[in-house]
Amino acid sequence: MIRAFRFPLRPTQAQEATLTAWLAQCCELYNAALEQRREAWRKQRVSMTRYQQQKELTDLRGSDHEWAAVPVYVQRSALERLERAFRGFYGRVRRGDVPGFPRFRSRERYDSFSIQCHKFRIEGDRVHLPKLGAVHFHAYRELRGTVRELRVHRGPRGWSISITCDIGEAPAKAPVRSVVGVDVGLEAFATLSNGERIENPRHFRVGAEALAHRQRSLARMKPGSRSRQRAKRLVGRAHLRIANQRLDHARKLAAALFARFDLVCHEDLQIARMVHGHLAKSIHDAAWGQFLRCIALKAEEAGKHCIAVDPRGTSQACAACGTVVKKELAEREHRCDCGFVTHRDHNAAMNVLARGLRVGQLTEASEVRRGL
């Protein structure tokens, strides 16, 4: 299993100036390499590769002392990022999605670079980087596994490092003795097949007033002034706080589910196709995709099971008899001629669980008990 551990970085003023200069040069290199690829294709119909551009970078470092002063692995991370951007572009073209050609980056939007494991070492609460020295970080938790990569990131709250580690093989899957179905929504964040409802925290709605106040302050600042830079950091911190709240909620809920159940069935949602219209902001605020990813990661780490099922018709079909009962989105009660009456989200969660048990491959030792 591959996991990332993020820690706040505490560089000195001189180290921070060096890191800022490295990021600026990475941004310049990224944009120059992108322009080179565009022009090579436009004029000669030639596709350049990362390795061709790395050879040219070697020649540039040999003739320019300013470029040679920056570690080569930092500069190559910019070329690797551009390569990933083009792979994503070609993949979207093949799938028929909106292509989204790679774009140029401003210095404010280029905020990280990566370092391979053999180029740094970690000793206690310090990470040693070539040409930079030992940089202190807040080691508030212990690293696990074998270190594979380090990423240095600059955000609204300062610098941080993300250390990618291989923590070994996933634990063996436990026998399934308790199961539950989960239906996500907007009225309630999630409804379980046993009737429990998890309220929607609506983090963006709660923090919207403070965010709007900071954005209005930013709009009044003079462009290029230090006051505007401080106001921009405050806006970024407001967005970061909301993002952290969403992630914390998703992680804790996923951990709570697998502490009680061995199998969690959920909908296989195509969220990108749902965020159009008057509900788009609420769907983004709920962050269903983040929650479903947390479920998958937690299931792997805990040795539990999760199954994604087709969500079509889960709200319309009766969980008791299977009859399709058409309902508008505003109708929140499921009422069937068979006499089964419940909330539509509870009915959907029961259908999700039933579909998951039909498609799930359970072990012979399992003693399945429905979470109803």
Image (spheres, rainbow, N blue to C red):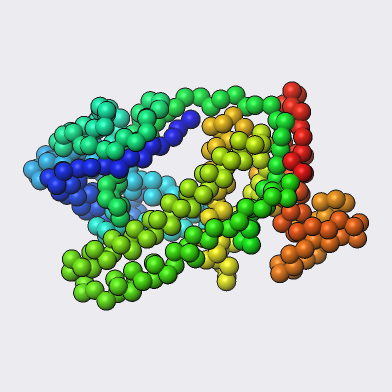
- The answer to whether residue 351 shows anywhere in this view is yes
Report x, y in % for residue 167.
44, 27
Residue 363 in which image quadrant: top right
Q: Is residue 167 left or right of residue 197?
A: left
Report x, y in % for residue 37.
30, 52
At x 39%, y 60%, the residue is 239
At x 56%, y 61%, the residue is 283
- The answer to whether residue 51 shows anywhere in this view is no
Report x, y in % for residue 216.
33, 74
Q: Is residue 143 left or right of residue 309?
A: left
Q: Quadrant of the C terminus?
A: top right
Residue 113 in which image quadrant: top left
Report x, y in % for residue 367.
76, 28
At x 31%, y 35%, the residue is 139
In this view of the protein, which residue sits in the foreground, 135 or 208? Answer: 208
Q: Residue furthest right?
A: 338
